[in-house]
Image (tube, rainbow, N blue to C red):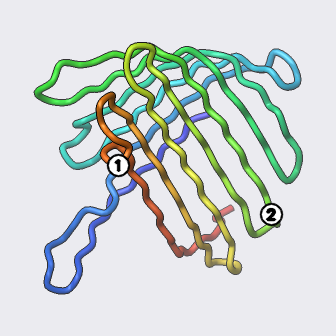
Amino acid sequence: MNALKLEYGKSSLENSTEQKNADLIYFDSICSFKMSNCIYPYLAFTVDSQFTEFFDPSLLSESAGIGWQLIENANQNLKVRLGAALRQTLASGMDAETDKGAESIINYDLKFSDRVKLVSELKMITAFEASTATRWDNSLFCRLGNYLTSQIEYRMVNNSIPGKSLDDTLETRLVFTLGFSYNLF
């Protein structure tokens, strides 16, 4: 499974300069195979960066481990993955840093109806010798008609750094969007 999320946006208020409000390049690739009905080994690769100062900084992570499908039915889906991970931080003017650690990921999808769906992913990488990186993405999708859709997205990112408070390392984002959607085929 491959997932690519690209976001870029600016906004300006009356009598103010433009400010960047969205800047994200996020690619997640997972290769897995089923060993049984609910257990599957996996390999994963993730790139987390931005358009501004193109790919500077970039966070790369590679991981391998075991996943479990805990719930799978028509209305909900719960997967848990645990594994070993490498995380690299690449930035101009700095030496590349590689952290070794453990990774845990929880994916949960809940379908309320044919028109409303919640998708949530909690991803944590705990480095053995450094800090814990946490990313929690939540999206509520709602189909408002044949062509109109809405989405509420909440993202929390915490790249905790020893000696820094949670206020200095925690980023949150809440976005509401409306869009048009149609099927070509």
Give the quarter of the image for residue 18: bottom left
State the residue at coordinates (53%, 31%): 124
State the residue at coordinates (38%, 55%): 7
The amino acid sitting under disc 2 is Phe
Nearer to me, 163 or 94: 163
Up the image or down, 94 lies above or below 116; here it is: above
Residue 84 image offset from top left, x and y in percent: 55, 14
State the residue at coordinates (70%, 80%): 145
If the image is split into quadrants, where does the N terminus sit? top right
Q: Are marks 2 and 1 in contact (CB under 8 Å)?
A: no
Q: Is residue 81 left or right of residue 127?
A: right
Crowd class of label 2 (few under 14; some 14 to 19; many from 20; radius 10 Å)? few
Which residue bears the numbered disc 1? 167
* Foreground disc of the pair 2, 1: 1
The circle drawn on residue 13 is: none
Nearer to me, 20 or 123: 123
Crowd class of label 1 (few under 14; some 14 to 19; many from 20; radius 10 Å)? few
Residue 43 image offset from top left, x and y in percent: 58, 19
The amino acid sitting under disc 1 is Asp
Residue 58 image offset from top left, x and y in percent: 30, 33
If the image is split into quadrants, where does the C terminus sit? bottom right
Q: Is residue 21 left or right of residue 65?
A: left
Up the image or down, 34 lies above or below 71; here it is: above
Q: Is residue 172 left or right of residue 141?
A: left
Up the image or down, 23 lies above or below 130; here it is: below
Sequence-first disc among 2 and 1: 2
Give the quarter of the image for residue 73: top right
What secondary structure is marked by label 2? loop
What secondary structure is marked by label 1? helix
The circle drawn on residue 112 is: 2
